[in-house]
Image (cartoon, grey):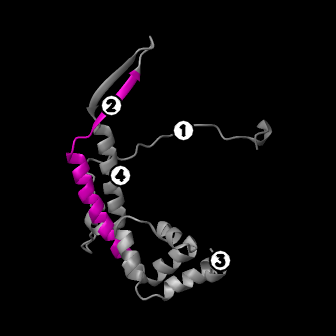
Amino acid sequence: MDTALLPADPGPIARLELVKAADTTPSVIFSRLTEGESLKEIAKAWAVPAGRFTEWFTTQHGELYDAALKVRADQLAHKALDVASTPQPGVTTKTKADGSVEVTEEDMLGHRKLYSETMLKLAGKWDRDRYGDKTDVRHSGLVPTLTIEIVGVAQAPQERVIEHEPVKKEDGLI
């Protein structure tokens, strides 16, 4: 094959400029994000610099990026429900002190729990309104007052008289 017939590679920066110039690029990126790809993976597939690509998309199309993450959050929440409610058989092997191996077949409950909780936690980060923890702090504008009343009989202070002799200069204390 004659390599002279192939067009010269414009380089990663020039490819990035071509990607940015295409009208369909934002919607294609949105679709790929909602299918589970990351911006880094998309940049690698298109052979463009991942940092500059990510910076361009998140600044120029930030609302679209946030919308894609919300779609992914919804998908993760549904998948977490599916994982939590579907038994997953697994095999556990345990080597005893005598060298024998004990094999147990059981549901991988711990694995399923960790996996579903991780998905829900990530969904909560990507779509805080729907899946995130909420703290609702409200203030009525009124400031409560606290009154403390001490009830009791106050005793008059007792007088104490201390008798002493006046100090004299001769004693050397003054």
SS category of the residue bearing label 2 = strand
Query: Residue 87 is drawn in which quadrant?
Result: top left
- Closer-to-camera residue (29/110): 29
Query: Residue 138 is drawn in which quadrant?
Result: bottom left
Give the CA distance from mark 4 to mark 1: 77 Å
Q: Is residue 125 visible?
A: yes
Give the mark, 1 or 3, whose residue is nearer the N terminus.
Answer: 3
SS category of the residue bearing label 4 = helix
Query: Residue 3 is drawn in which quadrant?
Result: bottom right
Horizontal arrangement in the rendering, residue 7 relative to residue 25 (left or right)? right
Residue, disc 2: 91
Three-letter code for the amino acid on which mark 3 is drawn: Thr
Residue 50 locus on image (x, y percent): 55, 71
Give the CA distance from mark 4 to mark 2: 22 Å
- Closer-to-camera residue (16/117): 16
Give the CA distance from mark 4 to mark 3: 49 Å
Give the mark, 4 or 1, whose residue is nearer the N terminus.
Answer: 4
Give the CA distance from mark 2 to mark 3: 54 Å
Q: Which residues are magenta?
A: 65-94
Q: Is residue 134 visible?
A: no
SS category of the residue bearing label 1 = loop
Does the magenta stretch mainly form a helix, a strand or a loop? helix
Magenta span includes 75: yes
Circles 4, 3 touching at the beta carbon (< 8 Å): no
Three-letter code for the amino acid on which mark 4 is drawn: Thr
Circles 4, 1 touching at the beta carbon (< 8 Å): no
Residue, disc 4: 118
Residue, disc 3: 3
Residue 136 locus on image (x, y percent): 27, 66
Picture residue at 32% right of the left edge, 61% below the top:
123
Q: Nearer the viewer, mark 4 or mark 2?
A: 2
